[in-house]
Amino acid sequence: MDTPTTVVNVGTDLLAAAVEAQAAAVTRVDWRPPMPGTEDDLVAVATDPLRADANVRALTAMLEVQATLVDVAPASEVLGLERGQFLHAGPPIGWDRAAGPLRGALMGGAALEGLVDDPEDAVALFESGSSVSLEPCHHRGTVGPMAGVVTPSMWMWVLEDQRTGRRTFCSLNEGLGKVLRYGAYSPEVLTRLRWMGDVLGPLLQRAVRATTESQGPVDVTGILTQMLQMGDEAHNRNRAGTLMLLRDLSPAMVAAGDPADVAEALRFVGGNDHFFLNLAMPACKLALDAARGIEGSTMVVAMARNGTDFGIQVAGTGEEWFTGPAQLADGLYLGDFGPDDANPDIGDSAITETAGIGGFAMATAPAIVRFVGGSVPDALATTRRMHEITLGENPRWSVPVLEFQGTPTGIDVARVCRTGILPQINTGMAGKVAGVGQVGAGLVTPPAEIFPAALARLAELARARG
């Protein structure tokens, strides 16, 4: 019998290693069985005659969006938020199940709005629920990092796809450490937020409007394209993006404001490398929202966490949330903090990974491992692995070290269930006790069970269509 010149090994590497030890060439195929219990649903979805075209349309619609910055304005104006109404990150949740950082942010938000004098007094207000309401940011075209709390007086970035006129929104970034979005509500946190409302927001509004009138709106999608070439991944590293935003807005800021206010604002933004994150997030949401409601599509259009639950929404299942328990990130901690101090994953910022950047584009930003843990080879391997669960690539957002391959884009529920590979997210970590603030940053994946749940719903709809 002839000795084979090449061997294809599927699954475990044990046989491959043995064959290589005998100087034979081996091609490894990384195959895994599908997630348990998903076999019949995978068949139903695979044979759905709508699926292939629906996924092409969903991915195409997403990639066609060009996010531009058109305004900055209070949430009361652009979102219609009224006194006592609060938005939060993640899927729907009530005060009774809210995690520490979300509670802390809501308490601080209540004090900011003058509903209570002391944030601690807000506990009774939210427990009674008589004069306050909670709603997910996503339900109002908005995204919020970490706790994601938005109150009526907070100033919001306003992004628009000028081809369709659709808009999305996000609050202004406070920086790192003891900030409201991490659940802190000390006097310094509220003082900073009031300055952002009184000085920074109005100054940015004048600058954005003046820039738009003289040069056209700032191209946020274009900045994302450039920053990925400059070492950012647009979730936990936004240094280049922040500097490019300053480049575009600072001339109008200087012309539109009091010199002392401008100097303070430039120092604040220049000292906050995460400032651009709050533009990257609504840009990603604007793109993904274009794929919502496409019947038969298995593409994920949102991943979001409220500190208790992790939820996803899918293009072909409307506004339905599929939820499971939020996971604790594995990463690096600040100071003396450790795993016992951290809350499970929280925030809408996983919209970046949903769009194909953040953790999916870690190969563009190998320095990110200094912040979230892991190694440079891990970052490269993560980006390669995410291609196995996505529908395509984004030609705008390319990875130089991978021969300018587009970032993996369009998470496919069916591919996740078929491979068992979960989306990789890099994230900040909030303290589990209200008021603590940030305790670290790390890597996390969604709870595995939410993808079979979404697949089951997609299969049910496919069977109903016959």
Image: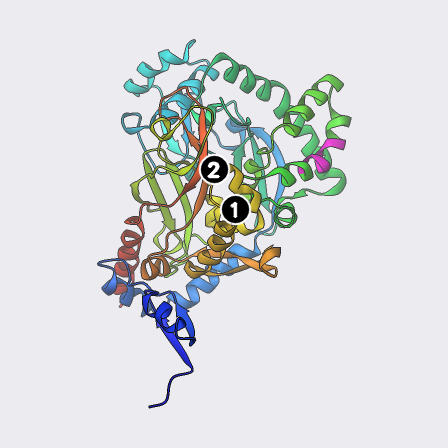
What amino acid does circle 1 point to? Cys
**Residue count near mark 2 (Cα–Cα under 10 Å), binned few <14, some 14–19, many ≥20:** many
Residue ID for mark 1: 284
Q: Is residue 339 above or below residue 454?
A: above
Please state if 63 lies on the left or on the right of 293 as rendered: right
| 172, 125: nearer the viewer | 172
Residue occupying image coordinates x 51% and y 46%: 358
For the N terminus, give its image quadrant.
Answer: bottom left
Which of the 4 image quadrants contains residue 192? top right
Q: Is the magenta region chiefly helix, strand or loop?
A: helix
Residue occupying image coordinates x 51% and y 28%: 75
- Label 1: element kind: helix
Mark with earlier residue (2, 1): 2
Checking the image for residue 384, the label placed there is: none
Residue ID for mark 2: 143
Can you see residue 465?
Answer: no
Which residue range is magenta in the image? 245-251
Does 72 appear in magenta?
no
Can you see residue 211?
Answer: yes
Which percent across, then down, holds residue 140? Answer: 45, 37
